[in-house]
Image: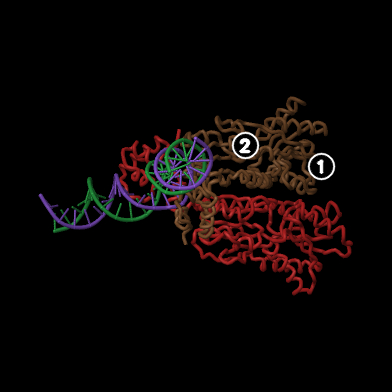
Chain colours: A brown, B red, C green, D purple
Amino acid sequence: MKRATAQNVAMEAGVSKWTVIRAFTPGASITEASKAKVLEAAERLNYRPNLLARSLATNSTHQVAVLVDDFANPHKLPFLEKLTASLQAEGLVTMLININQHYNHVHAILNADQRQVDAIVLFGTAFRDEMLTDHKLGRGGPPMFVLARDSQIEGVPAISCDAVVAIAEIGKHLLERGYRRPGFMAGARTLSTALGRRRNFKEFWRTTLGVELVEMSAERYSAEAGAQAARDYLSQVAPEDRVDVLMCENDALAFGAMDVARSEFGLRVPNDLAIVGFDNAAPAASPAYGLTTYEQPTDQMVKAAIDMILERAPRETVNFRGKLVVRDSA
Amino acid sequence: MKRATAQNVAMEAGVSKWTVIRAFTPGASITEASKAKVLEAAERLNYRPNLLARSLATNSTHQVAVLVDDFANPHKLPFLEKLTASLQAEGLVTMLININQHYNHVHAILNADQRQVDAIVLFGTAFRDEMLTDHKLGRGGPPMFVLARDSQIEGVPAISCDAVVAIAEIGKHLLERGYRRPGFMAGARTLSTALGRRRNFKEFWRTTLGVELVEMSAERYSAEAGAQAARDYLSQVAPEDRVDVLMCENDALAFGAMDVARSEFGLRVPNDLAIVGFDNAAPAASPAYGLTTYEQPTDQMVKAAIDMILERAPRETVNFRGKLVVRDSA
DNA sequence: TGCACGTTTGCTACCGGTAGCAAGAAATGT
DNA sequence: ACATTTCTTGCTACCGGTAGCAAACGTGCA
């Protein structure tokens, strides 16, 4: 059986379809009597307004496209939970788009655009700026926002955690604990530069102690990639030449690095090698890791993003201060 | 500047809007000459067909609503990644709906229905059957599917991992390893019964050894809840009376339980207490846990779900066999 | 009772596409 | 050269709503 339309309900209730619409429009001009009559008829026919038709007519879908690519990062899940819950609380619905080899940003944005979404959120995705300023993503599309990473793109504001402050806090803590030979493990190249963590960390040690940072790179942001990068480093560098503290660009890398350091090289954390992560993902709190890390202010970030989407706040890049979470690993 | 419509392109190209549409419809009857003319004009105006209008006219949105509620389970993320990637590969888009206190299944289903989604997937969500068979979710809505849990609901097929086989495999392994005093930790009540893991596990020990299962319950499916449940049990039961193997309904619970057993009670895993999980979430593979667990055949499950959505396969409940992943914890 | 006024209802036009029919143009056969 | 078939193009009607104007209605007041 086809679903009932306003027209059907109108006939059932003996009114015009516009009266039916009014019964479903809060604050519309309609008498209680006819409203009741319509609602009753609607109930009988199991009528529900078609939001597709409404969206077409009003030019607003209340849908927000959220682009995600780094599914190996356990921190993404609770973040995504907050984002979707908050969007829903504002009557917005999430269109989740998985960015991968077969489906890149241009595909995603074009598709979201054609579906007339109200906004597009690039949620921590790795992209080269040219990709977005590129060709056919011509003006007139939905507003775009970058969440949880930087954006240098004109007209695309970023909502992120203040990397300068974060790294300064972490650095200060490490200095006080007496670490002197710092290392840094970066993840995927494109995103690394956009996060600015390496740059700031390097700068920190250079200006405070005049020390050069030892840098290593993982292939991706995952525990496996972090493990491999740590394995490469530890097997190539003699114990006495190694860094005494390793900052990883995110927790996923840190977990992998810590696993390898302990189980494959017998190192004690933090005595032989201290490790710091970033994100405060769930396992970081577990005694199995006890990872010192930095927590992004996800609540504030989500709120800010939504305020911009709904134009309750100016659409411009903002940074929030997170907080250092000191545990056993450093 | 407003976005261009087919009508605009038609004027620009000097043809009717239907010719424009045809230029964008694969296999439509149109000469190469006019197609080229139209595409060029479209390019100039940056025209992209409005999928909302198309959906309204064709009565098909190519959108699938995916309902999720258990964001504390790290296993969800890679599963969700596969699901979204596979949907996208079929030209379907994911509408992600977060089921929580403020937004229950009825809200979600009603909303998805009004948005005319092609299908609704309940992805491992906890619900009471009455909620769905209930009232206003009358017939005529989009087809529903339950993924990664059981469904007893008429007309709502389930795609899941065969719990009977899984538990039998796990039980057999534990028997062989010599464990004789089994315990089981369940998560949220509504989902527990739908997963059938406890029931089957209990049955297994009863029929093989005639042993009664020790049961405990966590509040939710999270490491914290698992930790608390383990803490309660271990602090109340004397060492000599404790179970020798604890099967947890999923890995999240197992991580919490293992953390507590080791760090708060000084127990060695598996010597003092063996632990088994379910899902093979990422941290299970880490040497920090080395959790023996059971991996669901997510690829097959996702494929089956999509085949049903696209009506390439009959819409009926199917079960797939997963595989036991033996590590150090049991 | 008559008139002005505010409220309720129905109307036309529109959002941007799709479906399928019919007329016009081009290709084919005799 | 003309009839016939096939392809191309434009058309009307429709998907299910929204916007805002105009007519119909009921009410208060003189």
Q: Is residue B143 left or right of residue B176?
A: left
Q: Spatial distance from mark 1 to mark 2, Cα to Cα?
A: 37 Å
Q: Nearer the viewer, mark 1 or mark 2?
A: 2
Which residue position is annotated with label 1? A328
Q: Is residue B306 left or right of residue B162?
A: left
User: Residue A107 placed where, x, y %?
Assistant: 50, 43
Which residue position is annotated with label 2? A307
Disc 1 residue type? Asp
Q: Are marks 1 and 2 in contact (CB under 8 Å)?
A: no
> Taking A169 as reference, is B218 above or below it?
below
Q: Is residue B27 left or right of residue A17?
A: left
Q: Secondary structure at mark 2?
A: helix
Image quarter in which the N terminus of chain B is found: top left
Which circle's residue, 1 or 2, is located before the other in the chain? 2
> Taking A256 as reference, is A4 above or below it?
below
Residue at point 64%, 38% (across, down): A148
Disc 2 residue type? Asp
Q: Do the residues marked 1 and 2 share a common chain?
A: yes
Q: Chain of mark 2?
A: A
